Image: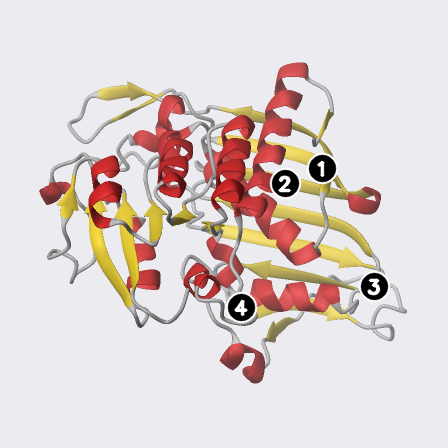
Amino acid sequence: MSQSTLRYAVIGAGGISAVHLNAIATQLGVEVVGISDPAAPAQWRLPEGYGHAPKFSDPAKLLRETRPDLVSICTPNKYHAELAQLAFAHGAHVACEKPMAMTLAEAGAMEAARARAGKHGGINFSYRNLRSFRFARELVARGDLGRLLRVNCVYLQSFLGAPAQPYSWRNDLALAGFGALGDLGVHMLDGVSFITGLDYQRVVGLAQTLIAEKPDAAGHPQRLTTDTNAAWLSELTGGIIATFETSQVAPGYGNFFRIELSGESGTLAVLSDSPDDLWLRAGPTLTRYATWQTDLPKQALPTEFMRGAKPVTPGGIVRAIRGEPEAEYPTFADGLRAQRMLHAIGESMRSQAWATVG
């Protein structure tokens, strides 16, 4: 596509729609041609400035009447597969929220539909935007840590355990497909793969629901059917052991996402709360000697690196559609890779044994 106006539509007007609109609709040459959500527009959670956009309750009607070039899917997870395939059938590219789908079969069907349509498909793995994650990826790729030896990943939140936080669709297995495992775990799976460049070989895991019920916005108790806690052990390419833990009910934690990895020549860690720094002890001289007092010095990222970094999702797909050189965004293939791991973790839980990542 040339630099002509890109017609853009959003399906789903919940809170995450603001992220997509602010990243995509604010780019030069992008026109918002419609927004769809079954809820009354008064309940929509759009950022300021989009009240004038044509409003629809039926996504099929939106696609037929507005003929968008690009569609963001910001709905509950249950509807991702159906809507993505519908958008491709109407000739649109798709930027979809994570996790990609409810099941591996759905994710596979989405990627097949994208390939048939010859369109771009992006998944909003938002931590790929963090400069610390991107710099860590460069350090690993250049071999500054040497051969990788271990990976540890933790993602902890407290919001679900807070009594003031009401029940939502994310607590309903029929709409979300997963709890902490899908909402947070999928970021962990993609983040580790993104930084290390490695694939998952096999996994053994466990998930739990540690809160029985929560009141909804009207004060009525609702049963939680999604997991609140999960942990798993994975083997990465080359036999590297990676450990993962996630929780939505850990008091004191806001949005604590940390990835740490060690190689023969160093250890580094990145933290979501500190996007312009990383913790690093590396180099053949420093690691030549054993260390008896743990110290991973906090390092500020190089100024020039930070100056050149730009967000890749969800807005990067626009640059790819326009054929800009070196355009980058998390693809449906990346979403499918994470979905294979979610599927394998589920298989491991059912069999109570290791599961191969297919």
Q: Residues within 10 Å of mark 1 (few under 14, many from 20)?
A: many
| Quarter residue 143 falls in | bottom right
Q: Along the polypeptide, which appears first: circle 1 or circle 4?
A: 4
Between residue 149 and residue 108, name the one nearer to us: 108
Q: Along the polypeptide, which appears first: circle 4 or circle 3?
A: 4
Mark 4 vs mark 3, CA separation in Å: 21 Å
The residue that label 2 is drawn on is 244
Q: Disc 4 marks which amino acid?
A: Arg
Tell me the element at label 4: helix
Q: How is the image coloured?
A: secondary structure
Nearer the observer: mark 2 or 3; the answer is 3
Q: Along the polypeptide, which appears first: circle 2 or circle 3?
A: 3
Q: Along the polypeptide, which appears first: circle 4 or circle 2?
A: 4
The residue that label 3 is drawn on is 146
Q: Which mark is on residue 131?
A: 4
Mark 3 vs mark 1, CA separation in Å: 21 Å
Nearer the observer: mark 1 or 2; the answer is 1
Q: Disc 2 marks which amino acid?
A: Phe
The residue that label 1 is drawn on is 234
The percent coordinates of residue 354 (x first, y second) are 74, 24
- Cβ atoms under marks 1 and 2 closer than 8 Å: yes
Tell me the element at label 1: strand
Mark 1 vs mark 4, CA separation in Å: 26 Å
Residue 300 visible somewhere in the drawing: yes
Q: Residues within 10 Å of mark 4 (few under 14, many from 20)?
A: many
Q: Along the polypeptide, which appears first: circle 1 or circle 2?
A: 1
Nearer the observer: mark 4 or 2; the answer is 4
Answer left or right for 49 relative to 350.
Answer: left
